[in-house]
Image (tube, coloured by chain):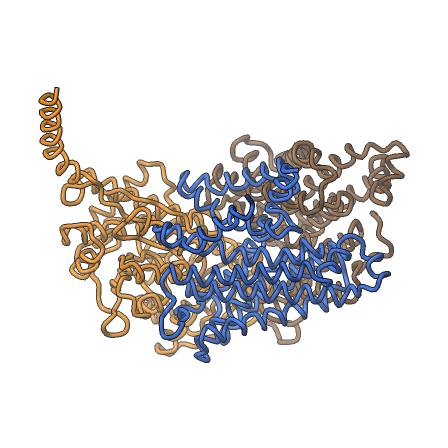
Chain colours: A blue, B orange, C brown
């Protein structure tokens, strides 16, 4: 039964552009895909190692800017820009990991916020590199074998492939020895240490992978919207990611996916449902209600019900 | 029984056939509007929206365009470029609007521009000032607000009369602020004035004392201030506290001098402001009657007077699109785009007619708006002292 | 001529000293209010283990409450400020009882998420009620600045600093000298033992949240007339509050006070001498440095309240 449902779901996803003809809905789907990758990446840190990183938008933004600049200034194709974005974001993750993971809890949160704040200010002020507040327009769309992937259905498949890849990566990671080390650290750090888990090394590794994934999402974003400006570092992006992971269910793999799809669709649904004055107020109220009724997150609560 | 059915069907078809075309003719012309209705610049976005609504109601009161009513579909871009792009997508694909007005801030407009190109829908830009908007080869863009260079040129004729010898700049750290610093700096240098320091402030900053202290030490005689009205209020108050004695000139047209008088009081005395609409003396505008009518209607609706200096943009934007639809004869995007090149009428700001701007073959449209300078004297807005009659 | 008064033309060295003194004075005024924000948050974060993203919204609430009391209620300025602080306390207590008490025992991420929802709802609610145009809050002080040597300071700012100091001292006294304060300190140090000793943990939580929110509202009520009241004013305030908490050490009142003053001065000096664009970066960089070299805060000896 579960197999059949899974197969049906896969078929639906693979043929989506055929039955979801509305370009706007396809747009929302693509954005949901990009945010799914972001949510999965944040989940690695937040859900599995238990470290709340509130600077995650920094890795997203670094990925977006890197990919855009590589394409615009050096003429690199998207297929090189993407790994470049992942690499640079991963490097930033390593730096943050090494610096910040000397501290834990509230202090780690603060360091990550500060890091994101500094990066944001750099992007606004370092005009020569990032063009400051004027942003980088005209980022080219990816090309595959001479065919431009500018159209929505094409980009959808690109994002779908990336989401599938990210999910598989997280799945493999979480079920490996490293993944078990993550969980051990989350549950009881001193105990984990006593059985031979090196906390700093393990956490830094988690930070690197998490940041690199966020960088991938950033690159996909840059080549889809084709305009990058310092607003990618907005704290609201980090907040959105946190909402997706925690409301979806941190520490599970399906949770971030559900959270990302739900909270990408929600603002758009509110846009249709009510006048602009009420949209964000409704969003806040709905969020509070969601946390109230499903404090563990959507996926864990559903899993518990099924038992 | 069958006969009954057939005749009923026949009647329904005939009546439907008669009514349907008339029904189609009544379908409203939809115009999309993208503005920042929440977030840091919510006030400005809402003023533009109010102006747009006045234009819509006036047009409909006169019988609409080509006999059809105008309907505005308003979206909030939340001061976020990503939202601006999403809003454009929704308006074009879901609501099928043939034309859009937006998106206030330059970043928002730039983010929405690829969507215009993708779907082939024209947008009238009512506020954004970045030069790149009309220079990036997007033939679906038609701007009625002045880019910073045009604004600087508008002030050039008064530079000598103002006696500007050495100017400093304090601008908000966005494309708008930086663009203004660049454009005005170049203009001043061409006129032989010296350019001192350029200080910037974050869009959300409330304490500019550090920047003011620096400017105070610089020894210039004029300060060019480019930011939204709330920050201008704060800068004026803090400058007064620090006893900064300079000529102060605000640029960008968003300074709402009336609001400054209310909120900054004596600190605003003597300051000059570049505006694109003078609601204090509407009869001096190119179409005095229209301007006066707009001011009166705005007051009748209970909107705050301070919002007029931005609200008119909404009116002129919608009026421009309506004019284009009239010329085109239909509300189809490509026809509207072609018609926009033929538009020539007078809005609240003045004559609106588009010249070509940008790379050949894919030019955008740029109109030449009227630019005015006013001064706050004795707690009221007046013509600047160098223009006042002796 | 723009602005009132004359500008003194001084010799360069004196001018440098003048500017420095002016920066310091500006920094102190700002720092006093940062301290208020920080004390409130350090109590909440430290005692309740709550990442309170809605803290800035109580700051905003304080400013709008002052505006409402003045413009709609016609109250005296000082009474209006007191009323705003009271509103902060009441709304804070209400939020704790309704939103947080039922979620007691949930993880820190869950309570953080509820605070995020509250933040979004409150801010957009304010946008709906008051509109996006900033509100100017009238005050009875003369606008001409007082002159202390080369430094100019507006009478309003003197009032703000003085009131902030009074409130800080009050907070101190409350924590150190009252039964409630003792109960709060006990709960912070060892929750289980405190409960065993008869401390009503639930009441302490409500009191802590109400008190912290009242202090944030006070900061907003004091700064509102200097700056302006607008719906998104709390976002930056929240961030500054978090910075002060880290600088001073979690739960450390003295640390938060000194941290707030330090942050205000450092920001002023950074904006004045390094670069105005990177003004907020100064705060961030300081935090990063502090956390790298003295993770428990600049002033923490051991982690405790007071």
Indicate the quadrant where residue A176 lies.
bottom right
Q: Quadrant of the N terminus of chain A?
A: top right
- B22 displayed left or right of C234: left
Is A116 placed above or below A243 here?
below
> How many marks do you count on the picture?
0
Residue lying at 86% horizontally and 45% vertically, measured from the top left: C189
x%, y% of residue B295?
Answer: 29, 43
Instruction: Examine the rendering and report whether any part of residue C5 can be seen.
Output: no
Instruction: Residue C35: give x, y in percent of width and height.
Output: 71, 51
In this view, the residue in front, A135 or B120, is B120
In the image, B228: left or right of A209? Answer: left
Between C306 and B198, the residue placed more toward the observer is C306
- Image spot of residue B129 (x, y percent): 36, 63
Can residue C11 be seen? yes
Which residue is pictured at 80% across the width and 63% down the height? A197
From the viewer's perspective, tell me whether residue A105 is left or right of residue C235: right
In the rendered view, tell whether residue B330 sits above or below residue B219.
above
Residue C77, given in percent of the width and then of the height, sits at 60, 37
Check the picture and name the quadrant holding the C terminus of chain A: top right
């Amino acid at each position: 039964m579960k197999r059949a449902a899974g197969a049906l779901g896969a078929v639906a996803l693979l043929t989506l552009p055929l039955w979801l003809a509305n370009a706007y809905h396809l747009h929302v789907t693509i954005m949901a895909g990009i945010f799914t990758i972001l949510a999965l990446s944040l989940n690695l840190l937040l859900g599995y190692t238990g470290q709340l990183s509130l600077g995650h938008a920094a890795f997203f933004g670094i990925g977006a800017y890197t990919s855009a600049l590589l394409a615009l200034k050096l003429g690199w194709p998207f297929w090189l820009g993407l790994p470049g974005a992942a690499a640079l974001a991963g490097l930033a993750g390593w730096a943050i990991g090494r610096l910040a993971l000397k501290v834990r809890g509230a202090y780690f949160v603060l360091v990550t916020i500060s890091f994101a704040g500094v990066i944001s200010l750099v992007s606004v002020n370092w005009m020569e590199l990032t063009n400051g507040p004027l942003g980088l327009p005209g980022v080219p769309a990816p090309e595959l074998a001479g065919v431009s992937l500018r159209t929505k259905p094409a980009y959808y498949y690109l994002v779908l492939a990336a989401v599938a890849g990210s999910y598989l990566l997280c799945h493999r990671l979480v079920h490996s020895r490293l993944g078990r080390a993550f969980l051990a650290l989350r549950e009881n750090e001193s105990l984990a240490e006593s059985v031979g888990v090196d906390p700093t090394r393990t956490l830094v590794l988690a930070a690197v992978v998490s940041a690199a994934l966020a960088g991938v999402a950033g690159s996909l974003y840059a080549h889809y919207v084709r305009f990058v400006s310092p607003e990618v570092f907005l704290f609201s992006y980090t907040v959105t990611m946190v909402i997706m992971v925690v409301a979806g269910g941190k520490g599970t793999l399906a949770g971030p996916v559900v959270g990302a799809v739900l909270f990408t669709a929600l603002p758009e649904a509110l846009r249709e449902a009510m006048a602009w004055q009420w949209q964000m107020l409704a969003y806040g109220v709905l969020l509070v209600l969601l946390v109230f009724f499903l404090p563990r997150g959507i996926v864990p609560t559903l899993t518990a019900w099924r038992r | 029984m069958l006969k009954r059915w057939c005749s009923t069907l026949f009647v329904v078809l005939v009546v439907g056939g008669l009514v349907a075309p008339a029904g189609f003719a009544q379908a409203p012309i939809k115009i999309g509007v993208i503005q920042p209705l929440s977030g840091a610049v919510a006030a400005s976005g809402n003023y533009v929206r109010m102006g747009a609504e006045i234009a819509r109601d006036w047009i409909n009161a006169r019988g609409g365009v080509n006999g059809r009513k105008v309907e505005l579909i308003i979206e909030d871009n939340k001061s976020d470029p990503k939202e601006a792009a999403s809003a454009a997508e929704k308006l074009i694909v879901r609501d099928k609007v043939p034309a859009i007005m937006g998106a206030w801030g330059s970043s928002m407009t730039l983010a929405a521009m690829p969507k215009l190109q993708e779907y082939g829908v024209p947008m009238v830009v009512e506020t954004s000032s970045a030069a790149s908007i009309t220079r990036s080869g997007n033939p679906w863009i038609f701007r009625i607000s002045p880019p910073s260079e045009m604004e600087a040129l508008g002030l050039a004729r008064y530079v000598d009369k103002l006696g500007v010898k050495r100017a400093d700049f304090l601008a908000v750290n966005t494309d708008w602020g930086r663009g203004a610093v660049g454009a005005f700096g170049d203009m001043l240098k061409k006129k032989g004035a010296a350019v001192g320091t350029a200080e910037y402030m974050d869009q959300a900053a409330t304490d500019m004392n550090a920047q003011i202290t620096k400017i105070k030490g610089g020894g210039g005689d004029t300060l060019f201030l480019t930011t939204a009205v709330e920050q201008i209020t704060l800068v004026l108050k803090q400058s007064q506290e620090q006893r900064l004695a300079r000529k102060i000139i605000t640029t960008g047209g968003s300074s709402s001098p009336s609001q400054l008088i209310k909120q900054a009081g004596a600190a605003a005395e003597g300051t000059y402001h570049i505006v694109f609409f003078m609601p204090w003396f509407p009869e001096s505008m190119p179409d005095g009657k229209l301007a006066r009518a707009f001011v009166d209607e705005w007051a009748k609706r209970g909107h705050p007077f301070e919002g007029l200096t931005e609200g008119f943009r909404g009116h002129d934007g919608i009026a421009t699109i309506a004019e284009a639809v009239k010329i085109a004869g239909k509300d189809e995007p490509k026809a509207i785009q072609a018609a926009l090149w033929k538009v020539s009428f007078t809005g609240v700001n003045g004559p609106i007619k588009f010249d070509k701007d940008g790379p050949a073959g894919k030019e955008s449209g740029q109109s030449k708006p009227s630019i005015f300078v006013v001064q706050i004297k004795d707690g009221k807005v007046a013509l600047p002292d160098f223009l006042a009659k002796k | 001529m723009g602005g009132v008064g004359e500008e003194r033309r001084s010799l360069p060295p004196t001018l440098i000293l003048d500017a420095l003194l002016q920066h310091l004075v500006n920094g102190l005024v700002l720092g006093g209010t940062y301290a208020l924000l920080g004390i409130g948050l350090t109590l909440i974060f430290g005692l309740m283990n709550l990442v309170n993203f809605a803290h800035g919204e109580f700051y905003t609430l304080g400013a709008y409450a002052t505006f409402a009391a003045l413009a709609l209620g016609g109250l005296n300025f000082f009474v209006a400020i007191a009323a705003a602080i009271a509103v902060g306390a009441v709304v804070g207590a209400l939020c704790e009882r309704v939103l947080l008490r039922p979620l007691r025992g949930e993880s820190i991420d869950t309570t953080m998420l509820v605070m995020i929802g509250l933040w979004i709802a409150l801010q957009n609610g304010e946008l709906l009620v008051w509109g996006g145009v900033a509100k100017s809050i009238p005050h009875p002080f003369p606008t001409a600045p007082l002159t202390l040597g080369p430094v100019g300071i507006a009478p309003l700012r003197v009032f703000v600093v003085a009131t902030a100091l009074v409130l800080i001292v009050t907070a101190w006294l409350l924590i150190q000298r009252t039964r409630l304060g003792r109960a709060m300190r006990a709960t912070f140090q060892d929750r289980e033992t405190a409960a065993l000793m008869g401390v009503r943990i639930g009441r302490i939580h409500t009191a802590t949240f109400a008190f912290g929110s009242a202090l944030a509202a006070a900061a907003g009520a004091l700064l509102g007339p200097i700056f302006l009241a607008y719906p998104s004013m709390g976002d930056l305030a929240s961030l500054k509050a978090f910075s002060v908490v880290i600088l001073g050490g979690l739960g450390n009142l003295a640390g938060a006070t000194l941290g707030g003053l330090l942050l205000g001065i450092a920001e002023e000096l950074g904006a004045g001498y390094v670069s105005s664009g990177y003004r907020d970066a100064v705060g961030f960089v300081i935090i990063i440095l502090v956390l790298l070299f003295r993770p428990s805060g600049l002033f923490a000896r051991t982690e405790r309240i007071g």
